[in-house]
Structures are given as C-alpha cells and as structure tokens.
Amino acid sequence: MKKLYSLMAVVLLASMLLSACGATTPTPAATQAPAPATQAPAATSAPATQPAATQASSGTAPDCTQANVFCVGDVTDVGHVDDKSFNQSTWEGVQKAKTDGVVDWAQYIETSDSKDYAKNIDTFAQAGYKVIVTTGFNLTDPTYAAAKQYPNIMFIGVDQGLQKDANHPDWPLPNLVGLVYHEDQSGFLVGALAAMISKSHKVGGVFGTDAVPAVWRYGEGYAAGAAYEDKKNGTTTTVTRVYHNDVGFDKTFTDPDWGATTAQSMIDKGADIIFGGGGITGNGAVDKAAADKVLAIGVDTDQYYTLPEADPYLLTSAMKPIPGPLEDLIKLAKSNKFPTNGLYYGASGYAPYHDTANLVPANVDAEMQALLKGLTDGSIQTGVSAAKPAQ
Amino acid sequence: MDWRRFAIIALIIVVMFGTVVLIGTSQNSPLVIITSMMATTIAVATPLTLGALSGIYCERAGVVNIGIEGMMLGAAFFGWLAAIYMNTIFHYPAMPSLIVGVIAAIITGGLFALLHAVLSITFKVDQIIGGTVINILAAGITGFLNRQLFFGAGSVFHGQIPNAPGVLPTIHIPLLADIPTVGRIFEQQPIAISAILLVIITHFVLFRTRWGLRTRAVGEHPRAADTVGINVIRMRYMNVIIGGFLAGLGGAYFTLEAISSFEANMTNGRGFIALAAMIFGNWTPFGAWTAALVFGAAQALQINLQFFRELIPPQLAVLQNSYVVGLAPYLLTMLILTGIIGKTIPPAADGKVYEK
C-alpha cells in the first residue's frame, strides 16, 4: 500500500506542476515563449521576498531595482496573454513599448485565480518595476490599494474607470491612471452598421456580465446605435442582448460554448447579425455565427486577425485599441508627465470590413464615417450611462 | 425512473417554454420560439447527456468517476489538436480531419479512463481521489500543451493558432427536416444525434443484455457476481473504459461540433453537471437524459427571458432582472432535486473497492 500512495503522490505532484505551468507563468518578454517546465514552479511557490518574476527569468533580466533600468510589469486578469482579447491587447501594448525602446525590460504574470491579484502586483512591486500595468476592471481595487502602498511606482489600470467615492477616498492618486474607453461609442457604431446592413431587421448581441461597466456600455451602445439609424431611415430593428450573468466573474468571459449556444438561439429566431462582445465567450458567438454563415461583429481588437475561421463573415469589430494609448501612457510615465487626473481616454472606433466590404454600400460607409466623426467631436451622443443602473 | 417523474419533468419544461412563448409572442410566433428553445435545449444537453452516460457505465459497475470533467476537457483538446494536425500539417480535407479528430477525442477519453481504472481498480486508490487526479491532470496538460505547441520554441505553427478545419456538418434528417419552422429541430450535428442514439443503446445494453446484467451485478454485489464466475475486475475495467469513450465523445462536442477552437478550461464544470444529471436520473440512461434536457431547458429559459427582456409585462418585472434570470437554471435544479425526484438509489457497491 505504501508504494501505491507514493505513486499517487507523484502523479498528483506532476499534475499540479503541469497545471501551474499552464496557468501562471511569468516569462521573458523577449521570446514570448512560455518558460520551460523546469523553471516555472518558482512562479507559484516562491515567497514574496523572492519575487517569482525575477527568478523565472534569471540570467536575462536586468536589475529592475536600479534607478536607470526602466522595467514594466503586466498583471493579467484571470486568463492568458494569448486570449485573443483584452489580456492579449494589453501585453501587445507593453511589448510595443519595449520594441520601440521605451522600456528596458517587460514581463507579465498571468493571474490564475482572482484571489491572487494583489499578490501578483506585489511581485512586480517588490522586484523594483517602475510601471505596473494591470489588465481589466476586476483589478480596480487591488490596483488602487497597491498604488497607495507604493507611491513611487506608476500604475496603469486598463479598463479601470475609478471615481472619488467612499471606497476610493484618495482618488485621483498621482501615480495611478485608468486607461478607459467610450465603449458605448464603439458599440453605437457597430449597432448603427448592423441596423443598416441587416435584412431581417433582427440583430443580436452576446455579452459577458453587464456588471462590468465596459461590457454594459458596449451592449447599450449597440442598441442605441441601431435605434439612431432606425430613426433616421424609418426602419424598426429588434436588438436583443443576452448577458452571461449566471456565472461568476471567473467564467463569464471564458465560456465559448455558452456564447455559441446563445448565438444559435438568436439565429434560430431570425437574427442575421451577431455581435460577440465578451472575451472568449463572445468569440464563441462570433465563431458560431460564421459557422452558420451569418454575419458577425467582433470586439475590442480587429478580430479579423484573431479569429481567422470567422473571416468570411466578420462584418467589423467594435474597437477599443489598447496598445497605442498604453504605450503613450508608458512614455508619459517614463518622462515624468504621468497624467494626474486619474483617467486617460483611448480612442474608440470600428474595424475595416475586410472580406465583407462588398456587403457595405458606399452610402452606408459614408454614414459610418460621419458617425465616427460626430461621436468623436461630441455632436452625436450615445445617451448611455457609464455603468448599469442599480436594479 | 417511473412515468410520474417523466410527467412532472415534462410539465416543468412545458411551463418554462410556455412562459417564454407568452412573453415573446408579439415578436416571434410561438412555433419559432418553441423550436428555437428546443434547439438550445438539445445543444446544451448534448455534452451533459454523454457525460452522464459515461458516469452510468462507470458507476453501474461500481466505480465512482468524478473525472468526467477532465476526460471531456482532455478529449476536447486532443481531438481538436488531431483535427488541426491532419488539416494543416498533413493537408487532409476538412471532413476526414474532423473524423480523425472525433476518433482521437474518443481514444483520449478512453486513455484517461484507463488511468482511472488502473488507479482505482488495480491499485485500489480512493476513487474520488483518482477522479480528482484526472481533473487536475487534464487541466494541466491541456493548458500547458496548448501554449507549448503553438507558441513554444520550434513550434510547427510558428506562434500562431492555425485555422481550424471548421465544425462537423449539420445533418438534415430526411422528411422531418423539411417541415417548415419545426424542421429546425431535426437539423442536428452528428454528436448531438449520436448522444440521443447512445441513450437508447445504453438502456438496451444495461437492461436487455447479458453484459448489462453482469455490469449491474458487479456494481450491486461484486462478491456474489464473483462466486457465479463473473470476472469483477475485468467487467469494471471494460465499463470504465467504455465510459471514457463516451466522455471523449462529449469532449469532442466542445471543439469539433459547437465551435472550432479550444480555450483553457472550456468545459467549465459541465462534467460535474453531467454527474448531477446522472444522479437525478437515478443511474438510468433515460432518466439522465431527461435531467440533462431539464438543464438544457433551464438554460434556454435563461437565454430567452433576456432575449425578450423588453416584452416582459410589469407584473413579472422580477424576470427583467438578469441576475434573477441567471439563477433560474440553478433554482430549478434544486427544486427538482429536492421536491420532485425524491430519493435516488445508487448502485450498492458504488465507490467500494473490490478485494477478493
């Protein structure tokens, strides 16, 4: 029996090691390849006094604690830097800053459990990183707390639109900026396009949880944009939105099967354009629509490049490009011109039509450009509130 | 499962569908709504049904298998990987690649099951722990390989996830699929169809064949089975591996039928819901299938109440709250479990190690 238990222990240990590699692997930025299995355990088991990040990349990483070495760390939300969604976009922005020579050393930690946010931020802080980027609304509070704890480190919170309130009395902090977007404008644009292109005048949207304000703004903007064009053209477009509110924050953006099923349900009821707005869950909806030969709209980045299987049916994507504005913020941090008002707005927009360009008549395209201009200069308002009103 | 339980479950599904029909009738015809909800129900129920059948084979033979989640996840990954290798590296057309993918998924499920059998039958390890090992192992292997193969040094894919060969084609069941509107229900993909066929086959195998009788004997009273000359160890091994094949097919649903990509942990606990369906169904194939359909219908209810949110009358305003609606599948599950299904009886020797 004793032998058996040691066998069991070996199998268990081996599997835990493997799952650790799969989940939380800080890796050298230069190669973008996951660290070899033999190095990875340091990432999860190292105590805070021995920062995992520097251990995992020993030999190549410079000493970030020195004043002249400008290191940037990226803490992801639960998920991976290759998620074809916002974690990936953020990491691309950090890498862009590195290839452009702004940053001497860049590294990421992938969060595998939402309880680890603070710990992962702390790992970079202890290692002397000058700028720490945290990805996603869910990291808002841990980032705020860390910014207060480490006043000499600059924090950039992607999708973290804070305001002064009871829980954040000291906002805005001089070393914390939320990189935020007018997602309602991106949603508005693709909603307007959907209303103009749809033949059945039924369009659907599949989203992650609307408790995340950015997701809420996408969804409501989508409906507002369709309504705007309806009013203009005298059409009636039914916009249905389904949010994945029935699971926790850890699953709401990573459930492609649910996204596919929901998209299918909309297509069965006559929808001929599906907007997939919520990480991997939304990707499932876009994939399903394309498989059913129904037009789809991607989200966050130009998903023409991230979901190649959907390309022939990808009408556009509601864009909030992260890499450009993020690099700008990192540059500002380096030159000590970090914004002190706590918020930095990135531009919103919509992606090119690519393979579906022949479906978009010239007058529709002209209208889209006019809408983008109007939204940018403020002459058109989406009328969407910043977050979901309390129910 | 007796007819009264079926009737009650059917009534629940009718009430769920009816509510949505009443709310949405001004926007879609009742037939369209019911058809679409049934299509959603069948889609959601497919992996749950296969997972539950997997559990039935294992537990009817006396081996608890909580590793179905891991078996499905592993099968989803390796099936998808095989299809991609066939398609992009060996340049086979989409259809043969997908078929190879499904076969690879089934074999993967079988191999994970073999590991479970070795641990729990030969080495007599606690079966719950054996299953947990499989769940952790599958999550680890798939997450690790998913990156290493595509983004690792020397990857044949050069750091890019390749274009997958698509999903299994929809089969139009002759005549039935030609009916206007309702025909949609009879346009199904192969794994969804085989799940239903396998329910019937499993029922026949378990209750109408010698194999089934022996399986049940081994799960109820292995010593008695042994004394009449049934090879308990062999029966358990075979049934656990058959269960693994079924879980593997369920895994193939995720990456070869529902969508054409793999995401880390994409089974999202459906293997455990499948086990719940097996228990609600009192370890019978038809019972488990109906339970899976209830889960599917609850999911359809949740999606469709949001779909028709603007049409919900003020008296039912509570249904406009998407969080309340999101609870529906779980509330219904608990109601059915506690109030209606009543007592369920597992196989007597379920989870017990057999020592001669």
Image (cartoon, grey):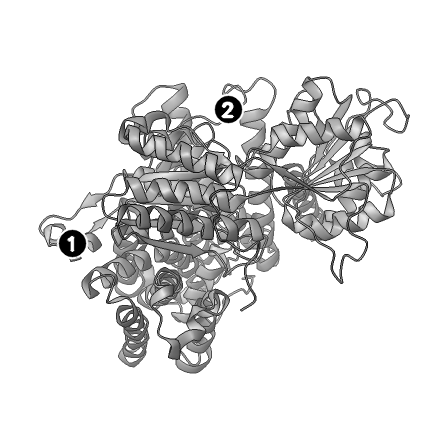
B244 or B72, nearer to the observer: B72
Residue B175 at x, y percent in the picture: 8, 51
Which residue: 32% across, 27% down? Answer: A357
Secondary structure at badge 2 equals loop
Give the camera-side residue of A372 and A152.
A372
Looking at the image, residue A8 lies above or below residue A370: below
Mark 1 — on which chain does it sit? B
Q: Is residue B326 above or below residue A257?
A: below
Q: Quadrant of residue A94?
A: top right
Quickly name the residue at label 2: B160
Residue closest to the eye, B195 or B322: B322
- Whether residue B252 is visible here, answered yes or no, is no
Figure disc tally: 2
- For image coordinates 71% across by 21% down, the residue present is A98
Q: Quadrant of the C terminus of chain B?
A: bottom right
Q: Is residue A339 visible?
A: yes
